Image (cartoon, rainbow, N blue to C red):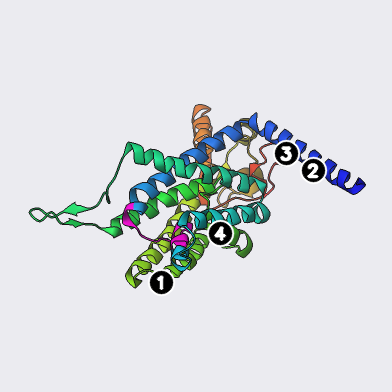
């Protein structure tokens, strides 16, 4: 009895802590911004599925495609039941292997995808592909699945990249991709391609070879585009500035932009004068703010910049106590 009471007490404390944490999160700007981003990202995904994937009837690497294959092998189980079971297993794995934040966000995105697709169906009813054409005089309708495939992959990749950037996903295959990304240390785009390709190959059991190959090509392109989008989202600008007024620049960056600064003592090869060089890593918007400030203050300087593919570590610690020492 004492052990049972102890377990109940621990569970009660954990539940209260969870509620308190959630209540605190509700009061933050970050929570509402990310909620909006997740909703917008899933709306983009629903557009890809409704307008391009469903009409084409292609099995691109996805949980829906795997469910269609399994329904052929297990005719006594409905497609809907299989989708529910697979998604439930993946969501449990998301909580266990990736973390509570990723799991909770993915639960939300998975819940709103279906209603969004139904909403689009009620507003824009469709009977076939948007790229289907009718031959004059014959009434014959010709579809172009390649256009559907390319548009689906492009739009879905944009949605996946948006959600991956805030540690969320569209659910399904993206959970598998995130797990591969975390434990195999592969890029998210490569992880999407590997997971989707493996699922696509199961379609050989029920589909023509040509359709499966088309799905594999689409999955490969999906991975390439996700890598491209993620590179754009994660890239930062590294700025090097040599100026006699470097203190003004440092003050602006630290107290207004709230980023870390690294300072180097450098010597000019021609003048042999020693000056201070300021090194800063910024987002594109922050870089624009810095340029505007330097123009406004009429600061004379020698400035160069390059693109950094990604930044890790103390990048998000925007406080003076956590300045990055590169």
Q: Nearer the viewer, mark 1 or mark 4?
A: 1
- Secondary element under disc 1, as helix, strand or loop, is helix
Q: Nearer the viewer, residue 43 or 150?
A: 43
Mark 3 and mark 4 lie on one chain; the one further toward the N terminus is 3
For label 3, the crowd category at 10 Å Cα-Cα, with few meaning under 14, some 14 to 19 and many 20 or more, is few
Q: CA distance from mark 1 to mark 4?
A: 21 Å
Tag of residue 11:
2
Residue 67 included in the magenta stretch of the image: yes
Callouts 1 and 4 close, C-beta under 8 Å: no
Q: Nearer the viewer, mark 3 or mark 1?
A: 1
**Residue closer to the observer: 304 or 71:** 71
Q: Which residue is mark 1?
A: 204
Nearer the N terminus, badge 1 or badge 4? 4
Q: Is residue 302 visible?
A: yes
Q: Please provide the residue range marked out in magenta.
A: 55-68
Toward which corner of the image does residue 58 lie, by quadrant? Answer: bottom left
Q: Earlier in the sequence, mark 4 or mark 2?
A: 2
Asked whether the residues under the numbered discs 3 and 2 touch, taking CB atoms below 8 Å apart as contact, a structural biologist would say no
Secondary structure of residue under mark 2: helix
Number of callouts in the render?
A: 4
Q: CA distance from mark 3 to mark 4?
A: 26 Å
Q: Earlier in the sequence, mark 3 or mark 2?
A: 2
User: Is any part of residue 235 visible from this angle?
Assistant: no
Rounded to the nearest angstrom, the CA distance separating label 2 from label 1 is: 47 Å
**Mark 4 residue element:** helix
Residue 29: horizontal and vertical position, in percent? 60, 31
Q: Residue at x 32, y 56 (%)?
A: 56
Q: Which mark is residue 176?
A: 4
What crowding class fits label 1: few (fewer than 14 Cα within 10 Å), some (14-19), or many (20 or more)?
Answer: some
- State the residue position of label 3: 18
- Extreme residue in the left direction: 137
């Amino acid at each position: 009895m004492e052990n049972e009471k102890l377990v109940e007490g621990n569970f009660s404390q954990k539940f209260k802590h969870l509620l308190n944490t959630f209540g605190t999160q509700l009061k933050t700007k970050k929570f509402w911004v990310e909620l909006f981003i997740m909703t917008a990202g899933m709306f983009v995904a629903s557009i890809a599925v409704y307008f391009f994937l469903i009409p084409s009837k292609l099995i691109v690497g996805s949980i829906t495609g795997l469910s269609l294959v399994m329904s052929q092998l297990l005719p006594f189980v409905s497609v809907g039941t299989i989708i529910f079971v697979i998604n439930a297993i993946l969501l449990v794995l998301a909580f266990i292997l990736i973390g509570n934040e990723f799991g909770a966000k993915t639960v939300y995105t998975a819940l709103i995808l279906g209603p969004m697709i139904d909403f689009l169906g009620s507003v824009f009813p469709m009977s076939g592909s948007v790229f289907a054409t009718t031959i004059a005089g014959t009434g014959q309708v010709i579809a172009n699945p390649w256009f559907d495939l390319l548009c689906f992959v492009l739009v879905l990749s944009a949605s996946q990249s948006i959600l991956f950037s805030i540690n969320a996903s569209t659910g399904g295959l993206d959970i598998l991709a995130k797990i591969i990304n975390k434990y195999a240390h592969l890029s998210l785009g490569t992880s999407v391609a590997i997971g989707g390709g493996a699922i696509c190959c199961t379609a050989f059991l029920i589909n023509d070879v040509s359709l499966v190959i088309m799905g594999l090509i689409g999955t490969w392109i999906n991975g390439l585009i996700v890598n491209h989008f993620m590179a754009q989202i994660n890239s930062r600008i590294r700025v090097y500035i040599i100026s006699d007024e470097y203190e003004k620049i440092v003050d602006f960056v630290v107290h207004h932009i709230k980023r870390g600064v690294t300072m180097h003592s450098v010597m000019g090869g021609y003048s042999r004068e020693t000056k201070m060089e300021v090194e800063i890593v910024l987002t594109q918007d922050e870089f624009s703010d810095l340029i505007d400030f330097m123009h406004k203050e009429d600061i004379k300087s020698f400035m160069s910049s390059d693109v950094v593919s990604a930044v890790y570590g103390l990048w998000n610690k925007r406080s003076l106590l956590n300045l990055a020492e590169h």
